[in-house]
């Protein structure tokens, strides 16, 4: 039963993450510009309302893939209409074997947008707990030059293999077409939940195969750990200051797998109980304002907190 599964998962997270948290003052109101300074070198800081609002377009992009390729190409879903200037170029996937994806251009952001489908929040725990936790290298034919020491979650390898086999080429082609059509040199890769894992891997793939003058941004929501510390360091090195990992209150999915060997890259933006957003330094900060401290207090977690996985993120929930 789901309640038993929840209890088991919660206990595993508690045992893995209860730890001494460094004593620090509450995040201040000091203004910061996310993604411009390495988060490894900054204290926890609170985002301003304007900075939080700047993520709203990406949140909409992350939310809408479940609407399906037809609606995405028409750009006529309810949430889509909040950004009428966006031009879709290509979409694919079936929502089953292949995660739905779409590519287009946003003139306000002056960026090509690449987005991958989130998982249903009600199904995220069964999906995560059903996956194995071995680590595996990226496909060397599709990711030439990436060290075999860079490993990713084997349970996600199924989605990765389908992405590489059936989606990587059309996604890359769509990005190239969009860059040429709109004379764009900036690419933003967006994903939520399990779509985060493909987004991270897609960003690596695109950077390898696109012109070296291409600049990147990665924005994810509620994503689990994708790989080992070498993978996290690879992301830090090749996308310096360009990653925003948005996590909502007590969403436990970003702390899966709760075992040694897996690690997030830097870029955590944590939404606290008062709905303020804080920028957390390093790969996985133990600051009391950041996710690990929220999760480690198992007695402050309730089954209803699983809903945190789907949002809201500044008022936007995942889903069509």
Image: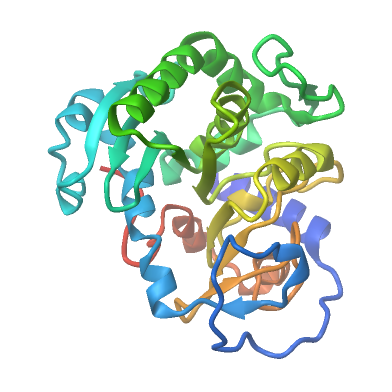
Specify the quadrant of the image occupied by residue 208. Answer: top right
Q: Nearer the viewer, residue 39 or 94?
A: 39
Q: Residue at x 48, y 12 (%)?
A: 169
Specify the quadrant of the image occupied by residue 14. Answer: bottom right
Q: How is the image coloured?
A: rainbow
Residue 118: percent from the left, percent from the top? 43, 39
* 243 relative to 39, above or below: above
* 154 relative to 247, above or below: above
Quadrant housing the C terminus: top left
Q: Is residue 302 left or right of residue 312?
A: right
Quadrant housing the N terminus: top right
Q: Nearer the viewer, residue 287 or 143?
A: 143
* 229 relative to 248, above or below: above
Specify the quadrant of the image occupied by residue 54. Answer: bottom left
Q: Residue at x 67, y 77 (%)?
A: 44
Q: Does the rendering let one see residue 68?
A: no
Residue 199: percent from the left, percent from the top? 53, 35
Q: Residue at x 55, y 50 (%)?
A: 3
Residue 100: percent from the left, percent from the top? 37, 26
**Number of numbered discs visible in the structure rendering:** 0
């Amino acid at each position: 039963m789901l309640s038993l599964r929840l209890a088991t998962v919660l206990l595993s997270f508690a045992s893995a993450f209860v730890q001494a948290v460094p004593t620090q003052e509450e995040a201040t109101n000091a203004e910061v510009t996310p993604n411009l300074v390495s988060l490894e070198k900054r204290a926890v800081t609170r985002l301003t309302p304007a900075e939080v609002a700047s993520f709203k377009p990406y949140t909409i992009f992350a939310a809408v893939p479940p609407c399906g390729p037809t609606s995405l190409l028409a750009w006529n879903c309810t949430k889509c209409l909040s950004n009428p200037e966006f031009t879709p170029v290509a979409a694919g996937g079936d929502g089953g074997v292949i995660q739905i994806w779409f590519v287009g251009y946003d003139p306000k952001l002056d960026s090509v947008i690449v987005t991958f489908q989130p998982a249903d929040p009600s199904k995220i725990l069964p999906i995560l707990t059903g996956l194995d936790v071995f680590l595996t290298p990226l496909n060397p034919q599709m990711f030439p030059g990436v060290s075999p020491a860079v490993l990713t979650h084997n349970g996600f390898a199924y989605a990765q293999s389908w992405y590489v086999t059936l989606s990587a080429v059309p996604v890359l082609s769509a990005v190239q077409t969009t860059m040429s059509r709109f004379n764009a040199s900036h690419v933003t890769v967006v994903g939520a939940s399990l779509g985060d894992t493909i987004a991270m891997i897609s960003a690596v793939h695109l950077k390898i195969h696109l012109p070296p003058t291409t600049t990147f941004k990665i924005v994810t929501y509620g994503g689990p750990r994708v790989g080992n510390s070498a993978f996290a360091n690879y992301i830090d090195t090749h996308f310096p200051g360009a990653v925003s990992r948005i996590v909502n209150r007590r969403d436990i999915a970003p702390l899966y797998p709760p075992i040694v060997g897996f690690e997030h890259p830097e870029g955590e933006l944590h939404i606290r109980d008062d709905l303020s957003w804080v920028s957390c330094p390093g790969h996985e900060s133990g600051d009391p304002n950041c996710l690990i401290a929220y999760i480690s207090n198992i007695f402050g977690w309730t089954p209803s907190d699983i809903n945190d996985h789907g949002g809201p993120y500044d008022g936007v929930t995942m889903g069509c």
